[in-house]
Image (spheres, rainbow, N blue to C red):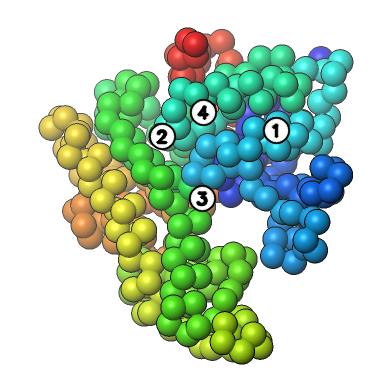
Amino acid sequence: MPRDLAIDLGTANTLVYARGEGIVLNEPSVIALNDQTNEVLAMGHEAWQMIGRTPSYIVAVRPLRQGAITDFEVTQRMIRLLLQRVGVSRFNRPRVVICVPSAITAVERRAVIEATRRAGAAESRLIEQPMAAAIGALLPIHEPVGNMVVDVGGGTTETALISLGGIVALKAVRVGSFDIDAVIQAYVRRAYGIAIGERTAEDIKIAIGSAAPTDDESRAEVRGRELMSGLPKTVVLTPAEIRKAIDEPVTAMVDSVLACLAQAPPELAQDLIMEGIHLTGGGGLLRGLDHRIANESKVPVHTVDAPLECVVLGAGECIESYEALNAMFIDQRR
């Protein structure tokens, strides 16, 4: 008997939920290929460890950028490997619900559907990530009450106001956690003349990155390659300088929340003062982001219990009652 699956196909991480079992896979959205033979060498955590550490003929790539497929063939192969890891074969073709950013175009949506079907799914449906996040956060989305969700992912930040099972106001920007990593890399290169990798920038963000001043701030020691001499060098970074460096992408995220609030009908806007804004996604774990959004919007902000798993759990709720929740899925007219 084929299992229904929900897949949160994220720019940073991919999670798979199996009906009746819960989350069965949580891996980085990275695949390692041999450039000469086009052979897949690794996927997920193993491929993530290879980023910036491979010989010239091995490339570790993220096939999704800003929530959209940048390499159709590689994405298809990655989805096929994901399905194989959770027990899918050509004799066992499941129905699949895919979580996608609301910012992607109709062409990008069709690419996701086609890649999933070619990878082995009997049927694929799409659900927008903010809607799935709201379901996963157990918000009363079917009631005539304003529920606002801010989903900060690796490539996109989406803010949605939901009421009576539909999205009333939506604002999505293609700015996410990877943009923060990129500006940290650029800052260290510009200020200290040191080149650091993508993984090191992410480690700096997790260690001392913040959107607003916090109480327990400490410095971080960073090692990289000096551009002038080419030799390894160590520098010490402070939270204040990293906060200043990442201000531009963080401001873009906060501004998108304010723009969505500005679209809210008055009756739902007053609900938000009581209910608050719910912060989901891995990017929502950036220290001080909730306080900054609350300070600028004058609306309380709550980080949900499982921000990383929230979207796939919401999509999992949809496959638990697949037929009853058809209205939640994105219209797939071609």
Mark 3, mark 1: which one is toward the viewer?
1
- Between discs 4 and 2, the one toward the N terminus: 2
State the residue position of label 1: 73
Residue 36's disc number: none
Contact, mark 3 vs mark 2 (Cβ under 8 Å): no
Q: Secondary structure at mark 3?
A: loop
Query: Looking at the picture, how far across and down is residue 21, in whole percent?
Result: 72, 31
State the residue position of label 3: 154
Residue 103's disc number: 2
Residue 108's disc number: 4
Mark 4: give few (<14), some (14-19) or many (20+) Cα within 10 Å: some
Of residues 240 and 118, the one drawn nearer to the viewer in this rendering: 118
Contact, mark 3 vs mark 1 (Cβ under 8 Å): no
Mark 2: give few (<14), some (14-19) or many (20+) Cα within 10 Å: many
- Between discs 1 and 4, the one toward the N terminus: 1
Left-right relation of 82 to 275: right
- Find the distance from the CA under tag 3 to the CA under tag 1: 21 Å
**From the viewer's perspective, is residue 210 above or below residue 332?**
below
Mark 1, mark 2: which one is toward the viewer?
1
- Between discs 1 and 2, the one toward the N terminus: 1
